[in-house]
Image (cartoon, helix red, strand yellow):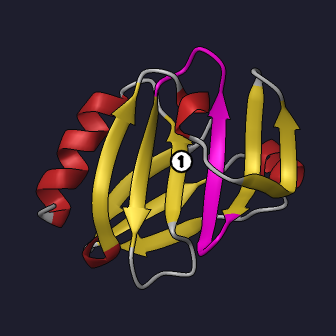
Amino acid sequence: MTTMRIDDGTLRVRLTTFEKIAGLIGNVDVPLTSIRKVEAHQDGLSAVRGIRAPGLGLPRVRNIGSWRGPGRNDLVSVRRGQPALRIELEGHKRTALVLGADDAEQWAHKLRTAASC
């Protein structure tokens, strides 16, 4: 399961070995100043936008990897039945992070407060 922590003005996202291999993605560090919007979603799969390229996509079950669209490059790791955070970014190589988190509402509040958005 993806883990997150806020450290020295940075959101640090750490992925499991499985997520890294299945999604062809790596850990991400995001300055809090790059966070523009944070949303909590009850169904993480509904927060995913775009087309998988590359990564793992099991319809209605699990999405891990990069999801792209016009002007978008989102890092995604969500599964069915788990809430998720959608973190919109600016000035970062990713345009959004979509991460499964059982405590998504708490994380959304924490990130909004820390990033002042």
Q: Quadrant of residue 45?
A: top right
Residue at 12 percent across and 54 percent down: it is 113
* Predominant SS along the magenta part: strand
Above or below, 48 relative to 25 = above
Residue under pointer 1: 98
Residue located farthest toward the top when viewing the structure as drawn: 81
Q: Quadrant of the C terminus?
A: bottom left
Which region is colored magenta? 69-83
Kind of element beneath mark 1: strand
Residue 28 at x, y percent in the picture: 56, 67
Residue 61 at x, y percent in the picture: 77, 21
Residue 41 at x, y percent in the picture: 41, 30
**Which one is in front, 51 or 2?**
51
Residue located farthest toward the front when viewing the structure as drawn: 70
Looking at the image, how many numbered discs can be counted on the residues? 1
**Which one is in front, 13 or 81?**
81
Q: Residues within 10 Å of mark 1 (few under 14, many from 20)?
A: many
Above or below, 32 relative to 86 = below
Q: Quadrant of the N terminus?
A: top right
Residue at 68 percent across and 53 percent down: it is 50
Horizontal side of residue 86 vs 56, given as left or right: left
Residue at 71 percent across and 46 percent down: it is 16
Q: Is residue 70 magenta?
A: yes
What amino acid type should be assigned to the residue bearing mark 1? Val
Residue located farthest toward the bottom when viewing the structure as drawn: 91
Q: Is residue 100 magenta?
A: no
Horizontal side of residue 86 vs 71, given as left or right: left
